[in-house]
Image (cartoon, rainbow, N blue to C red):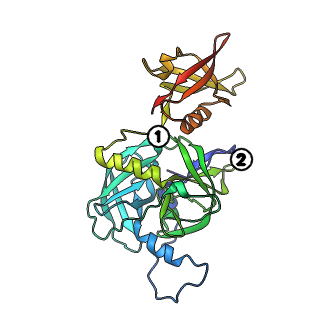
Amino acid sequence: MAAVVIGGGGFAAGAATAAPEAARIPASVTAPRAVTAPQPGPGSYAGVVARVLPSVVLIRTSAGLGSGVVLDRAGNIVTNAHVAGKATSFQIQLTGDPQPRHARLVGSYGPGDLAVIRADDPSGLTPARFGDSGRARAGDVVLAAGNPLGLSGSVTEGIISATGRAVTEPAENGSPGATLPDAIQTSAPINPGNSGGALVNTSGEVIGIPTLAAGSPQGNSQAQGIGFAIPSNVARDLAAQLIKSGHVTNSHRAAIGARIATATGQDGRPAGVGLVEVTPGGPAGRAGLRAGDVIRSAGRTPTPDAASLAEVLAAARPGQALTITVTRGTQTLTVPVTLGEL
């Protein structure tokens, strides 16, 4: 997936970069080599990098490339669903190892932008050490390890800027997009090819999976120092479900039980969230909502478009009661909805 950012303050999947991007790397660029070096001085993260890089792999598909993090000695590797795309077969490469290996898809979960692939030959794969993302705090120093533009074993540094963000990833280049709850915002640069890699703390623990970067409102470019990662606690939970059954059986995420789309006014601008289809017996249907209703707000949050409603739902929980305000023809209705599970 090409890292084409969305203007107007939107977001771009930082993730997989298209194959032509990788071709721009000079032929003389090779994977980093192990060298004998003096002991790192104060402030160096060389020890952290040395522990993390063996657990980060480069993932290639026919459509592009991205990164992945080794989960276990069975060869399971977690990455982003938009890195995996529609592929079921992959080539992976360890940092410093020029020999590619074959891997296959275990399962993919688009709404959470996570996928698991499995190496046919797991020998030599080093499982990452995962930390508790619930303990991450704004101001913590973090490193993003991955393969930006195909430069294997690259590391960038920054801090956690915020936690608990609900962000929407755009649908483009064959990816349906996703709304991510509880995302970690970081200033560590996330470039094309970084997606699916590792966001680690200074103890060398993976606390997030870098996934997308913010788009600059000033044209078609990436905003500097604003990236987002899926928390490790979410990634491990969903990955375990994918490994066990090939799909997610418990998303822990709220749903309204309807197919939605952004409604537009006569001026062509977003004017609410239209209910295209209501699931029979689902939360919206039980509350009396109908296809054709236009949601104007959810709780106290205005919903001018589908992305804004998706972010409200991402921050909610199944079973939670949410007051929905809709327009139906000339009527304005306020309806309590008990949310279901995505």
x and y percentages locating residue 48 in the rendered image: 50, 73
Q: Residues within 10 Å of mark 2 (few under 14, many from 20)?
A: some
- Please state the horizontal and vertical placement of residue 270, each as a whole percent of the image: 67, 28
Q: What residue type is labelled 1?
A: Pro
Q: Nearer the viewer, residue 43 or 15?
A: 43
Please identify the residue farthest to the top as the structure is shown. Answer: 330
Question: Where residue 304 appears, x then y in whole percent?
Answer: 66, 29
Residue drawn where x is 40% and y is 55% of the image: 78
Name the residue beneath numbered marker 1.
111
Q: Please tell me the numbered disc located at residue 217.
A: 2
Query: Is 60 situated left or right of 189 in this image?
Result: left
Q: Which amino acid does label 2 sit on?
A: Pro
**Residue toward you, 28 or 200:** 200
Q: Position of residue 188 (x, y in %)?
A: 60, 62
Task: Tell me if residue 258 comes above or below residue 34 in the rendering.
Answer: above
Residue 313 numbered mark, or none: none
Alpha-carbon span between mark 2 and mark 1: 25 Å
Q: Is residue 326 above or below residue 226?
A: above
Quadrant including the C terminus: top left
Residue pictured at 70% horizontal, 28% vertical: 269
Q: What element carries label 1?
A: helix
Q: Earlier in the sequence, mark 2 or mark 1?
A: 1
115 left or right, relative to 330:
left
